Image (spheres, coloured by chain):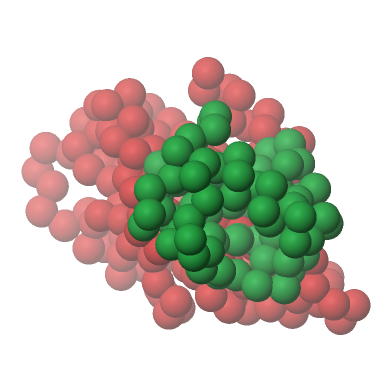
Amino acid sequence: MTRVLLFGRLSDIAGWREKILDPSPARLSDLRALLTADDAALGEALAAPGVQVALDQVLVRDDAALSPRSEVAFLPPMSGG
Amino acid sequence: MISLTDQGFDPGPLLSGFCRGRAETGAVASFTGLARAEGGETKILELEAYPGFTEAQIGAIAETARTRFDLQDLMIVHRIGQIAPGEPIVFVATAAAHRRAAFEACDYLMDYLKSRAPFWKKEHGPDGARWIEPRAQDHEDIARWA
């Protein structure tokens, strides 16, 4: 299973913050395709410039293989302070 | 020390505590950011973090600052959750042998916290809620350190 987390405006667009996908998609690109097939507006938002991805709490820029216990977080532009 | 808290904090005692027992420090600089009311447009500011990841990313920013400015110590306290206008949202303190490094490190840390630390900020106002994203000014601010 893969745990998917959405932050900021992404969770408002999707209407959820956390989702478990079981079985796990093989790769990050498969996960994106799955989420996009389910919700085109979310798919578009996830692909927008400035949205970063953390795989098991490490930022990844490219496609990556998912393990059966991966945590994937989609992070829109950050704003603290 | 880096901490995230969903409780209000008073920057005064944090600064006093940070200054204590520093015979070799010479300079402490601090910054306190307050939530703005924006003329009544913001009733509540809501800050979201990614537990574990947010602390780790801030830790990495802090380590870079420590090395770059030769800091002796630093402290970052950041609110999460719901924050009312006028309440402190962030506190940064830096300790160095001399003032320039302490000032600059404080400035650097704030620029990175504004647009590189994993926080997401939602403004709740009379006409609903909206997510705040970094402004052009925030990107220009951080580019100064390249």
Residue drawn 54% across and 29% down? Answer: A62
Tell me: A79 left or right of B69. Answer: right
Tell me: B1 left or right of A50. Answer: left
Query: Where does residue A79 sit, x and y in percent of width and height?
Result: 62, 51
> Which quadrant is home to the N terminus of chain A?
bottom left
Residue drawn 43% across and 56% down? Answer: A71
Residue furthest to the front: A23
Chain identifier, green in the render: A
**Quick one: B109 or B19, which is closer to the camera?**
B109
Tell me: B139 left or right of B27. Answer: right
Residue drawn 48% across and 61% down? Answer: A23
Residue drawn 10% across and 53% down? Answer: B21
> Which quadrant is home to the C terminus of chain A?
bottom right
Residue furthest to the right: B127
**Quick one: B19 or A59, which is closer to the camera?**
A59
Query: Where does residue A19 sit, x and y in percent of width and height?
Result: 56, 69
Query: Where does residue B124 sit, x and y in percent of width and height?
Result: 75, 75
Chain identifier, red in the render: B
Marker count (numbered): 0
Query: Where does residue B44 sit, x and y in percent of width and height?
Result: 69, 78
